[in-house]
Every structure is written in C-alpha cells, then in structure tokens.
Image: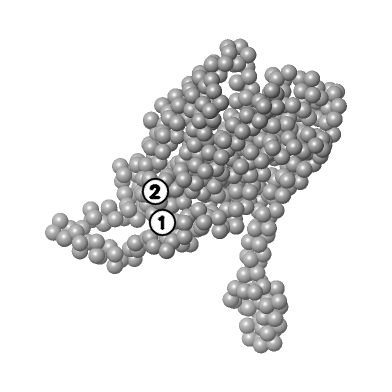
C-alpha cells in the first residue's frame, strides 16, 4: 500500500511537470503575439483557482490527475506571462533588482508553503489548507484588476515623455509608434495623410515591414544563442538543488534526528530566509553585470553541499552544522537565480537590436521565459528523482557530493562565455595597438599576421 501511494505521488508530480513543459512554449508564443498580456494572466489565475477547488474536493485518482494537469497549465501561463510583464514594465537598468525580487519571493513561497500548509492542516484540517490557497488566488486576481500594462498607459502619455523614457521595455508599443503618432499630429491640416506617410518613410526614422516569410521559429532562434542556453542551464541547476532538498532532506532529518514533520519543515527556513536577499543580488548584477555573479553562485554552492556529508549522526553539533551549511547554500543559490533571469532578458534585447526582424513584431520575452519555465519544471522532476535514487542506493554522503559537483557544473558555461567575451575584447585592443605601432613595418606586420592566424581563424581588422 505504501509503495502504491509513493507511485501515485510521483506520477501526479510528473503530470504537473509535463503540463508545464508542454504548456510553457505554447503560452509564450501566444503571449508574444497578444497585445494585452493581462488577459492571458487572468486566464492562468482562473485555471489555478478551478484546479485548486478540484484538488480539494477530489475523491478519485483521475480527478487528482486533472487538477494537477490544470495546475501545471496555470503555472506555465502565470510564470511565463508574469515575468514577461515584469520585463515590459521595469527599466533595463533595474531589471536585475526587480527580477531578483520576483524570483526570490517565488523561492521563499515554495520553501515556506509546505511549512504553513502543515501547520494549518494540523490546526484546522484538510479543507482549511485549500481555503488558504484559494484566498491567496482571489487576492492575486483582485490585485491584477488594478494593474495597468505599461504599453497601455503609454497610449495616454505625452509623446515627449514617451520619447525620453529610456526605461521603456515594451514589445508591442514602441517609440517608432510614438513618432508615427507625432508625425500625424504635426502635419498641416491641408496636407494629405498619404503624403505625410510617404515623407515619413523617406526620412531617417522610417520603419521597414517585418519579414514574415522564411523566418526561423522564435524558440529555435533562442535555443541557438549560447548565452541564453547558459542562463537556462544555470536556473536548471539552481532549482534542481532546491527540489532535491525538498525530496530527501525531510526524510533524512526524520531518520537521523528523530524530528517530527514540524521540525523537518522548520529546517527549510535556513534556505528560505537567505532567499529574501534576492533584490540586493539583482541590484548588484545591474551594476557589475550578471554573468560573474552567477558563476560565483554556482562555484560557491559546491563546498557547503559537499560538506553536508559530514552530517552523519545525532548530536547538537551535527544539527548546528546542518543549519550552517543550509544557510550557506541559501546565500549562494540566490546568487544564481536573479542574475540569470536578468541576463535572459538582456540576451533577447541584444538579439533584437542586432536583428530587429529576428523575432517578429511581438518580440520574444514571453517565449524566452517559457524556456526558463521549462527548465524550472524539468528541474523539479530531475532533482528529487536523482537525489532520492542516490540516497537510497549509495547514501547521504554520495548524494551531497554529487549535488556539489552538479552545482559547480553550472558555472562552466557562464565562465567560458565570459572568458571568451573577455578574450575577444583583449584581442581587439591588442590588434589595434600593434597595428598602430607597427603600421609602417612590413616584417612586423607579417609576423603579427602569422601569430594571429595560428591562434584564431578570424581576427578583427586593425
């Protein structure tokens, strides 16, 4: 009977993760082509409300499966559209700080919610837990009713204010649209509209129609950007480690220390409280750049994870060691999520600047965060399954060592990308320096050419 319960529990989690994996790219594609993202967000919250009610009253396994499927679809919508709305709203100079606020709040909620659910269940019963959840969802819906998207507000702002707003991030309403409206209002009353449009097209600020034929699907374009893949892998590592703790830590402290469910839940505060520093980490990434912070986060997470193997018997010192290592993991893991999410939006923006027709008129922020959401969903499946299998077969020490190595692997893609970028900058500087000093020396120029040809296939011209 116990084995059957475990199987159904795992299967229900798998259905939830599969719904996110399948639904996120679809929701991202729709959100990028819908002028009003709020509609999709409302839809996701209403689906979540219905799924929560269904889960609470379910008396059969197939009803639980349907409710979890709807919850996964709702998570795909709300995460994807919510992060895209955040990018649309805040300025590019502050995206790290606000992304850190959003994702650290999400991490804090994921860690604390089992604790709160356990307390409410023990004090008020089964349905009280779902009542608390439904109350939060209804409050969220009411908050969204007073939310105004930035591109909607821009329609009622003066064109001068819109033109000088450097923090604008919208995808459907752009400064070109504002210039179009300004040019329409600036033409003389006797000037025909088609003449004004012709003059505008012939001016320096003309807009070319976006290519609609032969364009590669946006998801494939995004997956072809190494920097974006490095960011996605970083969040996969981060969430996998947190999900691994969710799966194995309560059982381990119960068996080792004899803790009850409440004490096992309280240990997660060691991970939750450091997550509140996300806004500070995001603000730091806005100032010095996100990549090296993410590299440091992955590299620094490895030592405390490996040192958790020392927690092997029941004593006060061992309990303090466990709490200390978990707090260190909490502070290092938050160094990953905020910079990585901010860098994800920066990648999309830079790609659009380099090739304005790469993603089409709707942009690609929602689809980029759909991939982000897919990575998180895959991590929630990967972490507990792998960590549980390692603990069951090889023991706690082997599992923590494997997680430490896995955490360090997250630093490798970002590290090599940053080194490549740094090497390219140094190469350009060295190229110009040598080209200036040895411009009139033929032999030195030939020597320089041989050296550069041996190290790089393509060298920037002096």
How was this image coloured? one colour
> Visible in this render: residue 131?
yes
Which secondary structure lies at badge 1? loop
- Residue at 27%, 53% in the rendered image: 181
Callout 2 crowding tier (Cα within 10 Å): few <14, some 14–19, many ≥20: some
Which secondary structure lies at badge 2? loop
Residues marked 1 and 2 touching at CB (< 8 Å): yes
Q: According to the image, label 1 marks what residue?
A: 360
Of pointers 1 and 2, the one earlier in the residue sequence: 2
Horizontal relation, residue 255 to residue 171: left or right: right
Question: For residue 458, what is the image quadrant?
Answer: bottom right
Q: Position of residue 375 (x, y in %)?
A: 59, 44
- Residue at 85%, 24% in the rendered image: 314
Q: Nearer the viewer, residue 95 or 311?
A: 311
Quadrant location, the C terminus? bottom right
Q: According to the image, label 2 marks what residue?
A: 33
Q: Nearer the viewer, residue 20 or 243?
A: 20
Q: Position of residue 407 (x, y in %)?
A: 72, 45
Quadrant location, the N terminus? top right
Q: Is residue 59 above or below residue 203?
A: above
> Visible in this render: residue 422?
no
Horizontal relation, residue 372 to residue 238: left or right: left
Q: Position of residue 368 (x, y in %)?
A: 51, 49
**Separation of marks 1 and 2 at Cα, in angstroms:** 9 Å
- Residue at 76%, 46% in the rendered image: 405
Q: Which residue in the rendered view is the most extreme toward the top?
A: 123
Q: Is residue 171 above or below residue 376?
A: below
């Amino acid at each position: 009977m116990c084995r059957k319960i475990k199987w159904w529990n795992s299967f229900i989690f798998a259905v939830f993760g599969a719904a996110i994996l399948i639904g996120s790219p679809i929701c991202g594609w729709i959100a990028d082509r819908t002028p009003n993202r709020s509609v999709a967000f409302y839809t996701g919250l209403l689906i979540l409300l219905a799924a929560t009610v269904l889960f609470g009253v379910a008396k059969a396994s197939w009803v639980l499966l349907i409710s979890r499927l709807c919850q996964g679809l709702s998570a795909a919508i709300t995460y994807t559209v919510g992060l895209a709305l955040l990018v649309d709203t805040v300025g590019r100079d502050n995206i790290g700080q606000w992304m850190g606020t959003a994702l650290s709040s999400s991490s804090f909620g994921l860690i604390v919610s089992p604790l709160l659910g356990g307390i409410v269940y023990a004090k008020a019963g089964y349905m009280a837990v779902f009542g608390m959840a439904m109350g939060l969802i209804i409050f969220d819906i009411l908050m969204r009713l007073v939310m105004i998207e930035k591109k909607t507000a821009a329609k009622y702002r003066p064109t001068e204010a819109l033109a000088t707003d450097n923090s604008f991030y919208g995808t459907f309403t752009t400064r070109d649209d504002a210039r179009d409206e300004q040019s329409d209002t600036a033409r003389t009353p006797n000037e025909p509209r088609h003449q004004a449009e012709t003059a505008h097209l012939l001016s320096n600020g003309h807009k070319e129609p976006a290519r609609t034929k032969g364009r590669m699907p946006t998801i494939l374009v995004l997956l072809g950007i190494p920097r974006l893949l490095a960011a996605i892998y970083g969040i996969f590592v981060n969430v996998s480690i947190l999900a691994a703790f969710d799966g194995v830590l309560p059982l381990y402290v119960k068996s080792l220390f004899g803790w009850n469910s409440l004490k096992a839940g309280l240990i997660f505060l060691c991970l939750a409280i450091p997550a509140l520093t996300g806004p500070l980490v995001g603000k730091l990434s806005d100032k010095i750049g996100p990549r090296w912070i993410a590299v440091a986060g992955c590299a620094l997470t490895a030592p405390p994870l490996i040192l958790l193997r020392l927690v092997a018997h029941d004593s006060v010192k061992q309990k303090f060691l466990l709490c200390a290592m978990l707090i260190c993991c909490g502070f290092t893991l938050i160094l990953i999520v905020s910079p990585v999410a901010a860098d994800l939006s920066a990648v999309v923006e830079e790609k659009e600047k380099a090739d304005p027709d790469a993603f089409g008129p709707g942009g690609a922020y929602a689809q980029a965060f759909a991939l982000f959401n897919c990575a998180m969903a895959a991590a929630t499946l990967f972490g507990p399954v792998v960590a549980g299998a390692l603990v069951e077969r090889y023991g706690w020490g082997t599992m923590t060592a494997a997680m430490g190595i896995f955490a360090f692997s997250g630093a490798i893609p970002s590290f090599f990308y940053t080194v490549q970028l740094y090497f390219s900058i140094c190469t350009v500087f060295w190229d110009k320096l040598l080209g200036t000093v040895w411009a009139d020396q033929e032999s030195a120029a030939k020597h320089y050419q041989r050296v550069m040809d041996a190290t790089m296939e393509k060298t920037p011209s002096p």
